[in-house]
Image (cartoon, grey):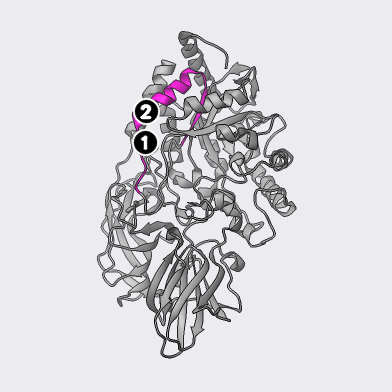
Amino acid sequence: MASYDSGMRSVAFVLFLAAGIALAQSASPHTFVVANGQFQLDGHPYQILSGEMHYPRVPRAYWRDRFRKARAMGLNTITTYVFWNLHEPRPGIYDFSGQNDVAEYIREAQQEGLNVILRPGPYVCAEWDLGGYPSWLLKDRSLTLRSTDPKYIAAMNTWFARLAKEVSPLLIQHGGPIIAIQVENEYGSFGTDHAYMEAVKSALLKSGLAAPDTLLYTADGAEQVPNGSLPELPAVINFGSGDAKKAFATFKKLRPEGPFMSGEYWAGWFDHWGEHHHTTDAASNAAEYEWMLRQGYSVSMYMFHGGTSFGWMNGANSNGSNYEPDTTSYDYDAPLNESGQPTAKFMAFRDAIARVTGKTPPAIPPSMPAGTYPISKRSESVSLWQSLPKPVESDKLLTMEDLDQSYGYILYRTKLPASPGGELTIDGLHDYAQVYVDHKLIGTLDRRLDQSHLALPAIPASATLDILVENSGRVNFTKVIRTERKGITGSVTVAGTQPQHWQIYSLPMTDLAALHFTSASCEGPCFYRFGMNVPNTQNSGDSERGDTFLNTHGISKGMAFLNDRPLGRFWDVGPEFALYTPGPWIHPGLNEIILFDLKGNAGESLTTADHADYGPTPSR
């Protein structure tokens, strides 16, 4: 960036901010380029103050509220990934409706005075299932993700061409707010194949997703820039709290000409099941952020608002031997908390921006406080064993992907002869299994704890072995993604012998209406139906009913559904003990809540709370 004294820098910053707001609210074509080591908007230096926020993690009815809060913190840009697996759940079947309407998300950002940085991947990481890849790519075992494999490249090209129809009209060159597009995502932490990176860049251009003069860039950790960048494109760097000075010093040795930008400044962190909730120090974060702004650097804060990985969509980490599934909450200790309330960190960043710019930001929009709603004390229930679909008969074990299933559970059933007992071994458990003999629970195996062996009791006569496997979230980082199929990916042996035939039940849990609930009690893997009563207040629109949280203390492990929508996972290992339940997703009167609990009991009950609950975390 050009050199300014502190007074001139503040004046220049205000001009940058004003120019950005004018652009975002304009529908006429503009230019956004790198020149003389600087980002330039319509020929004038421009400092990007961005915050990351993902459209599927925020209820659509709240998008505009969150954009206004971004402006109120002092931001001029929103950064978002695009999640391929949301939009193409089956090959050639696309969904850009409702919560998946990424184009509307971008339009609303522009209407609220914000520019947009788009990160279409195709790999996005993001603590999201399989890093955003659709699971059907894993069905073909010869296809290699994040490579120049022709089959992978063909699928990527088709996806980009379809996405372009949605978002290319919103490029800055066409009067939209998209000022830049990222090529791939932190590839330098994955590999060094520059031919692959060139292929992604070429696909963005050929598909029309990027225009010939769209600003394309790459993003990596500072030390990985040589691996993941392209010499003809600007590069930005990603790092966490406390690393800004070191990261930029490293980067300047590699790219002394600039521009200088943190593509992800991790001002918080995410949570794994069985760990404590992560937080970072707001004052330290804000001071480091202010230092970057005063150097003239551009910054995209990850996350400005984390929100929630609703339903089945959380990811997981793995180094190739371990497995760490993420919670449904993606609070991230961000400036806006999971339910969109400004935090002390929000105010610290807001004050830092105001000090640098010398400009008072817009007023902070009011937030509706969360509340509680009564839930019926008695539930209806039905056992999973009474709700099984028709199985697939197979002489070999099949994964979810083999059955065209993306999420949920899968049940493997076989017959065991009479025996004195022995050891059950599962090779390739992905991810959590409950093992039954004649519907009696024998034990559990957890990939998270590296468990694969279980002692079976003596079997006096022929018996049924059931292995109920949960997909706890696909790994979204490292080369593990290439083999991250779900179910049992290897073999099963009982006392050293492999069963020769299986009945395999696909359990995606997408048709809850087919369940036959009764008033009878249920224990074990069961569905429980509750009613949540919401009063009909006057003029209660979608964004005017208060949020709530489902209190998950007292229930074990499974999935919660709200009015047929998968809401999120619960697990008594913590740290998350309250599922965010958005007001726009509930309606006046009786709302249906269904729990699928792997270890249900006859006294299963549920209440609501008016706040998030992140612990304390029990021992594993």
Range of the magenta residues?
276-302
**Left or right of 144, for residue 585:** left
**Left or right of 32, for residue 507:** left
* Picture quadrant of residue 103: top right
* Picture quadrant of residue 522: bottom left
Residue 616 shows in the view: yes
User: Dots 2 and 1: beta carbons under 8 Å?
Assistant: yes
Where residue 284 is drawn, which disc sits there? 2
Q: In this rendering, is residue 87 above or below 376? A: above
Q: Circle 1 is placed at which residue position?
A: 280
Q: In this rendering, is residue 307 above or below 42? A: below
Q: CA distance from mark 2 to mark 1?
A: 8 Å
Q: Position of residue 590 (x, y in %)?
A: 33, 60
Residue type of the residue flagged with mark 1:
Thr
Q: Position of residue 20 (x, y in %)?
A: 53, 23
Q: Nearer the viewer, residue 342 or 458?
A: 458
- Quarter of the image where the C terminus is located: bottom left
